[in-house]
Image (spheres, helix red, strand yellow):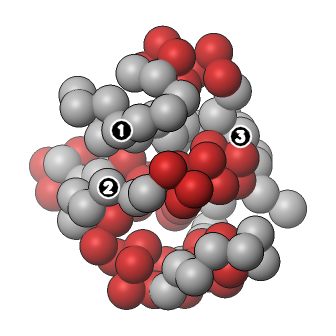
Amino acid sequence: MSETEASRHPLVAARRVRGWSQDGLATLLQARGLGTTKTTVRRWERGTHPDSAAQAALRDLFAVTPEIADRLGGRGGCPRAVSWPLPTRGTTGGR
């Protein structure tokens, strides 16, 4: 992994491991009732924090258990140290 890849937001890696484009992730979130667009996903990947509804949908899509969320900073808000918890390997999530 290059230095640039290592410094990217965890959402980039989690999305790519699953083979999802930014647009594809936005579509999955739209199917869950959110108004997410490719631009929204891009903003999150550049450091903007998703709102609580989007965080909940992302945790569900990426199969982040409550235990992992608690360990990484909590279920309700954006943990400061890790942005918001997303696994990058070892889960399938989604469809």
Q: Residue at x 29, y 73 (%)?
A: 43
Secondary element at image label 3: loop
Q: Residue at x 54, y 59 (%)?
A: 54
Secondary element at image label 1: loop
Quarter holding residue 32: bottom right
Mark 2 vs mark 1: which is more N-terminal?
2
Q: Position of residue 24 (x, y in %)?
A: 62, 81
User: Which residue is under mark 3?
Assistant: 63
Q: Residue at x 85, y 62 (%)?
A: 95
Horizontal side of residue 3 vs 12, given as left or right:
left
Vertical placement of residue 49 versus 92, above or below: below
Q: Residues within 10 Å of mark 1 (few under 14, many from 20)?
A: some
Inspect the image, locate mark 2, and give the three-letter code of the amino acid beneath it.
His
Inspect the image, locate mark 3, and give the three-letter code of the amino acid beneath it.
Ala
In this rendering, does residue 12 appear at all?
yes
Mark 2 vs mark 3: which is more N-terminal?
2
Q: Given the current orientation, which residue lies at the most extreme right position?
A: 95
User: Which residue is under mark 1?
Assistant: 78
Quarter holding residue 94: bottom right
Q: Residue at x 64, y 34 (%)?
A: 64
Q: Position of residue 1 (x, y in %)?
A: 29, 48
Vertical placement of residue 1 versus 37, above or below: above
User: Which residue is under mark 2?
Assistant: 49
57 and 16: which is toward the camera: 57
Horizontal side of residue 57 vs 77, given as left or right:
right
Vertical placement of residue 61 versus 75, above or below: below
Mark 3 vs mark 1: which is more N-terminal?
3
Inspect the image, locate mark 1, and give the three-letter code of the amino acid beneath it.
Cys
